[in-house]
Image (tube, rainbow, N blue to C red):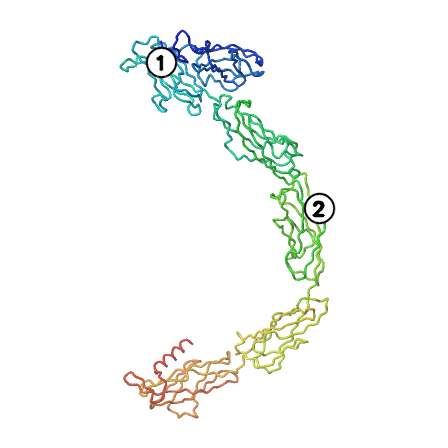
Amino acid sequence: MVVLLLTSAEDLDCTPGFQQKVFHINQPAQFIEDQAILNLTFSDCKGNNKLHYEVSSPYFKVNDDGSLVALKNITAVGKTLFVHARTPHAEDMAELVIVGGKDIQGSLQDIFKFARTSPVPRQKRSIVVSPILIPENQRQPFPRDVGKVVDSDRPEGSKFRLTGKGVDQEPKGIFRINENTGSVSVTQTLDREMIATYQLFVETTDVNGKTLEGPVPLEVIVIDQNDNRPIFREGPYVGHVMEGSPTGTTVMRMTAFDADDPATDNALLRYNIRQQTPDKPSPNMFYIDPEKGDIVTVVSPALLDRETLENPKYELIIEAQDMAGLDVGLTGTATATIMIDDKNDHSPKFTKKEFQATVEEGAVGVIVNLTVEDKDDPATGAWRAAYTIINGNPGQSFEIHTNPQTNEGMLSVVKPLDYEISAFHTLLIKVENEDPLVPDVSYGPSSTATVHITVLDVNEGPVFYPDPMTVTRQENISVGSVLLTVNATDPDSLQHQTIRYSVYKDPAGWLNINPINGTVDTMAVLDRESPFVHNSVYTALFLAIDSGNPPATGTGTLLITLEDVNDNAPFIYPTVAEVCDDAKNLSVVILGASDKDLHPNTDPFKFEIHKQAVPDKVWKVSKINNTHALVSLLQNLNKANYHLPIMVTDSGKPPMTNITDLRVQVCSCKNSKVDCNAAGALHLSMTSLLLVSLFTLACL
């Protein structure tokens, strides 16, 4: 028969440990403080020196005489208690079953799998094993005995063998067994948070290592110690609550984690608020549910007013304590930041009912900043202002925008004002928030204001009408011809000022203006072909200057469209040609003609030889088209320079004629060499001249 004992015992007449392992206690109406519940008897068989007791519930303790008492009056403690006793020589566990108790924290019996009955029968032999209970965090010395396997029927020479994780499997070497005596020992400190239970196996073997009995399962349970503080792992913790929220409004939840056994009080957490900053208007603005960690408001909505608080941000030091909040429990803290959020419960109000502004006529830009007050949070739409002009702006001359930094209304002139039309303007302006007001707040009379605007008279320059001014005249009209009389008016009608005129820009110097009545006449001949004329239009600028102090000036533009007159004779090109003295082709040159005038005063042109100076039957001019003609010889000529007068006439009415000498060089052309030196000729080949002339003809 194999028996597992909780301590080693060299003297089998004394069994170390509790003399009774299981107690049954009827749940009373109340456990009375310091009143003995039962007496426990423990012996280490060596005098119980330095005997120490531990109870699984923080509400009980065991006195030195072994009496179990409550630390305070308690009505419910659960279904099971465990008492752990320890001396330097032995330790053991006793179970206290509360008959009728409620399972309020989880049964430790389920955790420890503590056997309340006699050993479990086996088919081959009757073997009794109970789990070994070892508190975590035990101190030196090691190894220390934690139990013993006893087999009274074990054959002589047989040995005990221990296997499993923690022995011959990783983590190896934590447990070992004396193969002769059966004593089980632990070699190091255990950590329940690393491994809570070890499943081992015990068997007996013969001298050859053959299994005689077993393996018998042996469970080692690591008893939790309160060695882990609660930790807040999910920070930072920031909550928001709207100002004026009802009492009991949930702001946020804070929960901590405890690595200890969740089925024991070692991980049973309770929450409380250690500190509130600031502590105004009440040191207890918030409450935390001790079990759930919910933070709620506890002050009236009137006190939760963001505009009256010194600081809309509160910082709470939240403490989590294990052991259900008892003083012996370990604690952990974290900071909760709670923001009192603004709601739009204050309407914006103008600082004044009336504002004054002045602006010069003709000017644009901001003329006045309208100031408002709003008690709401400047970082929200409950504070930001939106302005509207609700009266006095029919011409849309004014606009108003919000300055995002100051919340002021910037009133601007966007269309220049005219003093002569209206010297005063009155605007009615309202202000609202970007966000809507809460239902019980509305915009009042202070949310509207009047702006009185005075327009200052400015000496404005005279204005020409029309501008630009246009006239059409023939070029070459006689000097002194009147073109027009300009007209400029002074916008400052109330000042009754006089206007004088002058020429500002007259590029060709053709024009003159009467400074009193504005009559413009010519002081030179107008020429459409002048380089100052573009597309038959001549542009001049005039000034109108009033008699103000200082005087103001206006500028007017005159556009003169010049009609063409046939005042330019045509001209020919080229004026030099070459021909070989023995040329078979007697063509000399193709002539072109051009005229600065416009149609119908230009082509078609008429080309002729001025016969009075040239013998007949030597030269010939033939028309090619309206602008070109061919000059040719009727016979070969000797090497020399010849001057042929060409007369060209345009189609104007009356027509204009021009006579130009065409210089023809007759050259010696032998062996592909052209020699014009004897005739004093230019070194140009006849072929080149013909090509140039034909190219010009093609382009036209």
Q: Decide: is 243 above or below 465.
A: above
Q: Amino acid at mark 2?
A: Ser
Q: Decide: is 635 above or below 187.
A: below
Look at the numbered disc 1 and give the secondary structure of its residue.
loop
Q: Decide: is 670 above or below 255.
A: below
- Horizontal and vertical percent for residue 596? 49, 80
- Nearest the viewer among 655 and 503 is 503
User: Image quadrant of residue 670?
Assistant: bottom left
Among the two numbered marks 2 and 1 on one chain, the one whose residue lies closer to the N terminus:
1
Look at the numbered disc 2 and give the secondary structure of its residue.
helix
Q: Amino acid at mark 1?
A: Gly
| Pointer 1 residue | 182
Q: How much space separates mark 2 and mark 1, taking CA atoms?
A: 96 Å
Instruction: Indicate the quadrant containing the C terminus: top left, top right, bottom left or bottom right.
Output: bottom left
- Nearest the viewer among 444 and 410 is 410
619 left or right of 471? left
Q: Decide: is 319 above or below 640.
A: above
Label 2 Cα neighbours within 10 Å, binned few <14 / some 14-19 / many ≥20: some
Residue 377 shows which numbered tag? none
What is the residue that sits farthest to the top in this orientation?
A: 13
What is the residue that sits farthest to the left in this orientation?
A: 208
- Horizontal and vertical percent for residue 500? 67, 74
User: Image quadrant of residue 377?
Assistant: top right
167 left or right of 360? left
Label 1 Cα neighbours within 10 Å, binned few <14 / some 14-19 / many ≥20: many
User: Image quadrant of residue 314?
Assistant: top right
7 left or right of 291? left
Residue 112 seen in the figure: yes
- Horizontal and vertical percent for residue 592? 43, 81
17 left or right of 552? left
Instruction: Indicate the quadrant containing the N terminus: top left, top right, bottom left or bottom right.
Output: top left
| Pointer 2 residue | 446
